[in-house]
Structure formats: structure tokens, C-alpha cells
Amino acid sequence: MSENQIQLDYQVITSLVQPGARVLDLGCGDGELLAHLARARAAKVQGVELDEQSIYKCVAKGLSVFHSDIDSGLAGYPDQSFDVVILNESIQQVKKVDYVLEEALRVGRRVIVGFPNFAHYRVRWGLLFNGRSPTTPNLPFQWHNTPNLRFLSISDFHHYCMERGIKVLKAYYLGKKKALHVLPNLRAFNAIFVISNGQIKK
Amino acid sequence: MVENLNIEPAKPAAGSAGIARTQFLNLGNEAINLESGQKLENVTLAYETYGRLNAEKNNAILIEHAFSGDAHAAGLHEGETAPGWWDNMIGPGKAFDTNRYFVVCSNMIGGCKGSTGPSSTDPRTGKPYGLRFPVITVADMIEAQRHLIDHLGIRRLLAVSGGSMGGMLTLQWVASYPDRVRSAIPIATTLKHSPQQIAFNEVGRQAVMADPSWRNGDYYETGQPERGLAVARMIGHITYMSDTSMEEKFSRRLKEENYSFSFNADFEVEGYLRYRGDNFVKRFDANSYLYITKAMDYFDLSGDKLILPGRMLDTRFLVIAFKSDWLYPAYQSEKLVNLLKTRHVDTTFCEITSTYGHDAFLLEVEEQTHLISHFLDKTFQGYSVSQQS
């Protein structure tokens, strides 16, 4: 992922977090996004991360973080205990997607899901003309070393939400440098969805 | 190993806490009201301090020792060569940085390292208590220690920390005096003793009590039950290691070249356990073994007992567990973490990769130092990250 791309999805996510909000980041990595939210939004932030080395980096940033996998990291939280639950660049690595999203929607008033778009034209091109598993700036891995378990597109996720009655409050489609509106499933490198379980008051 | 951290060490090279001196506080007429309903009178606490208490008295850290530990946590006693039991973690530039923090460690009551225990003189008889010493709990130990913290003029502790039983004492501080604990660092510990943990303790107690020299605890003139206590300690040491660490440390190596075809200690592991057992009886009282293990077994802060219902706790937590620890397995720390989650307590949890088993909390210095020093820094500075704008 390019530096600009990181900036862009962080920018979008930051704009979605209210000042002082309680935020849970599932798969928070080294805590860059959380540290940014704590600084820029004075958010009360908590991370969940499986990788031990990333935990050390989070703690060095002064963040509170649980060493746990996302698939079991939500158990124990009371309903609606966070204003925002974030799954940025982690949903494609989750084993139990239905369970994790149900739990995220239970625990958070709103859930922000960011993921790389597998239907970007460069992905399609790579598979169609090169006949090889595609790699792009957003999907930089080879077939044998990718941590991604799932390869979903923007249309896939819209469809998934519709099927399950999950309310899509907003969706942002990100190109290299800015948000896109035309033909996002073909042109966007990644997407950021804001979803809720449809039962909460808006 | 902490790898690839792009973080400059915030501290100078780590050094020794220097010459340490054990001090004693006698509570005088102030009796401790015990959980059992009994009273413990004329209580003495042995303690050491390192670093300086600042003018605001907000830089005090209380270190809780494990089962067989003592107040001598860091530095050197005059004329001795062996440093305190957590010297690699406490000192200038270390995890508990004595350049910044005032560190206190005291011997638990029931022990035999200077604080009142079953080997102390019973003021009513003028002889050692033996089994006339009342059965005490972890909460009683904290109640006694609370007097020491009052005596030192500390209203609120910056942190309480300890591993193993020291972690239980840490949790008990939070349960007993939540307002007086700014942060807690329980390591390789549990909210309650499991049947397996109780079982190992019971075997140890039975080994002590089965030794004829034990004499129902009245052995102070005749010599203590050394064989029984040594066996108890040998069992303990097995539980502190892991299959992997024993393989690495001993494998099947022999002390001599060939088998002796006798019941001598052929294997290095046998020699090690015997050595550990024999050493232990020189420094530890058999009755203290009984009383302290019983206190551990009674320990149970599960459910609503750690944080009372409806109470908001603003103590920050850093919970640490180790992968190969099978005596206090990581799932027990995770249960603690889950409880803290449900109560919205600011918590960090890390399960450190280690092959040392339960002993890891004394040996995995680098990772713990990284976690603890940053956690304390954040706690001491206030919530700086979330307050920047």
C-alpha cells in the first residue's frame, strides 16, 4: 500500500469518528491508526491484535491493546460498549466473518469496515491476461504468502450486507489519491463501509 | 525477543539499585482483623525501598513477591554478592526505574523473612507460634501491607505489580483498595486458584506434614521437617519449568559417566531438584510453607469480587502471561482480561512467547521491561496520547 493510500483511508476513518468517541480497533496492527485517532479525535481507543511484535509497538505508543485473535477478541464486551468498532484491512483475514461482524455490530453502535477491492480492474486484468494470481499495491502478496483468507469486492460486500439486513450507512470508495464515485467496483483500490445492525437510532 | 522496534531506549544504561537495607515496621497495638474473624497482634513487616518518593508522593510502586520471595527485591545487601530476587527488573534505567520511581517491597505476613509468621514469637506464650498462628488469607496480607503504605505516607500507589502469587496480591490490592491503586501489573497469575493449583499445594503440604520431624508444627527446638519440605519444594520446581525448558536444561544428561545402578541421583535433573530442595530448607520455614500455600488456595476474586457491582474502576491494567506456563496458564490471565473488559477497565494484555514455563516471569526480562516501562511511563505522565489534540 502506498503512503498516500494509508493517509487516505486514515483520513476517511478519522472523519467518521466523533471527538471523544470510544473506539475499538480489531486487528489494530502496530497501532498507527489508533494513535492517530487518539491524537486527532481525543478518542478513547482500545486495540485487539494477534501479532506479539505489534503488541510491543502499540504499548510503546502508549496504547491499550489486547493480545488476542479477532475471532475471539469480542467476547465479554457488553452490548453497544463502543461508539465505533473498526475492522480496517482485517476482515479479509478473519476466519469466522459472520460471527465477527455480528459481534462487532453488537458491541459497537457503528462498525467501520475497510478492505481491498478484489474487483479492481488491475486485479481483473492480471487474472484475465496474465493468468496469474493478481498483485496490486493494495494486494501486494503472492498466492503462497498472502495472509488474506478472503477475496471480496465492493459489490460482494454490498450484497452481503443486503442479504443479512445490515444497514450500510455510508460507503467510501478510494482511488489512489481521492475518493471515487463512478464505477467504484472497477476503479477503487479499497472501500470503507460504515454499517450498523439497523436497530439503533440514527 | 522484541524485534525491529523503531523506538529509542528512553533511559540510560541499566544499573544496580545499590546497597539495600531491610527495614522493619512494627504495627504496635494495631491488631490486624483477619478474614477468619481472628486477630493478629504485634505485627512486624520487613520491607525495603529503592529510589526516592517525590514531593507529590505519586511515584510509588509496590512490588509483591511470589510464594517464597522476600522484601529484598533489588540491589545488594552489605557484604553479599547475590542481588535481590527481581534485580534485573528494578533499578536505575530498568523496568521499574528507580531514577523515576520509589519502589517498595515487603515480606508478606505468614512468611519467614522478617515479617510476622508462624515462626515468630507468640506474645502470649513467649514461644514460636507454630500452628497457633491464625490461618491468614491474601486479603489479610494486603491489610497488613496497607499499614506500611500508610506509614510511608503514600495515599495512592502509581502501580502495584508482581508475578505468580505476587500477581494475586496485586489483584487483592485492587479489590481491597481500588482508589489507592493507579495501575496494576499482574503477571503469570490468576483470579482464583484452580483445582490443579490447589492439588499441587496440597501434595506439598502433605509432604511437610508427613515428615515425623514436623511434630504438628512444634519443631522450632528440635529442627524443622527438612525432608518433607525439600520434597515439597522439588515438586514446586517441576511446576515452575516446562517440558521444553527441562529438556534444554537437563535432557537425560548424567552426573557421572555411567548409570550407578542404585537410587543415587544419576540424572542431572535429579541432582538439580535435590540441590534446590536442600537449599530451600535452609532458608524457608515449613510452617510458613503450609500457611502461605493455604492462603493461595483460598484466593478467589472471580465474579464480582475483584470489582464490586456497579463500581467504576479507573485503575489501568497491564496483564502479562507466558506461553509455556502450565502452572498459571495464559487462559487464566485471559479470564482476568475478559472480566476487566466487561467492566470497561483500561487494559493491556500480552502473552509473551517463552519456553521457560512459570519461571518466565523471573527470566524474560527484555519483553517485560519493554511493556512495563512504557506502561508506567504512560501511567505516570497521565493519558497524554488521548489528551493531545
Image (cartoon, coloured by chain):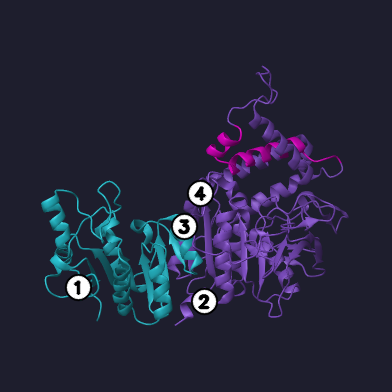
Chain colours: A cyan, B purple
Q: CA distance from mark 1 to mark 3?
A: 34 Å
Q: Chain of mark 3?
A: B
Question: Is B244 placed left or right of B119 in the picture?
Answer: left
* Residue B247 lies in the magenta stretch: yes
Asked if residue A119 shows in the view, the reply is: no
Q: Position of residue B324 (x, y in %)?
A: 51, 45
In front of the other: B313 or B80: B80
Q: Which mark is residue B335?
A: 3
**Disc 2 marks which residue?**
B383
Q: Amino acid at mark 4?
A: Pro
Q: CA distance from mark 2 to mark 3?
A: 26 Å
Q: Is residue A18 above or below residue A57?
A: below
Q: Which one is in front in this view, the residue at disc 4 or the one at disc 2?
A: 2
Q: Which one is in front in this view, the residue at disc 2 or the one at disc 3?
A: 2
- Do marks 4 and 2 share a chain? yes
Magenta stretch?
B222-250
Disc with the residue nearer the chain's start (4 vs 2):
4
Q: Which one is in front in this view, the residue at disc 1 or the one at disc 2?
A: 2
Q: What is the quadrant of the C terminus of chain B in the image?
A: bottom left
In front of the other: B303 or B69: B69
Q: Which mark is residue B150?
A: none
**Disc 4 marks which residue?**
B329
Q: Secondary structure at mark 4?
A: loop
Disc with the residue nearer the chain's start (3 vs 4):
4
Q: How many marks?
A: 4
**Disc 1 marks which residue?**
A168
For image coordinates 44% across by 59% down, the residue present is A54
Q: Secondary structure at mark 1?
A: strand
Q: CA distance from mark 3 to mark 4?
A: 11 Å
Q: CA distance from mark 1 to mark 2?
A: 34 Å
For image coordinates 28% across by 71% down, the residue present is A112
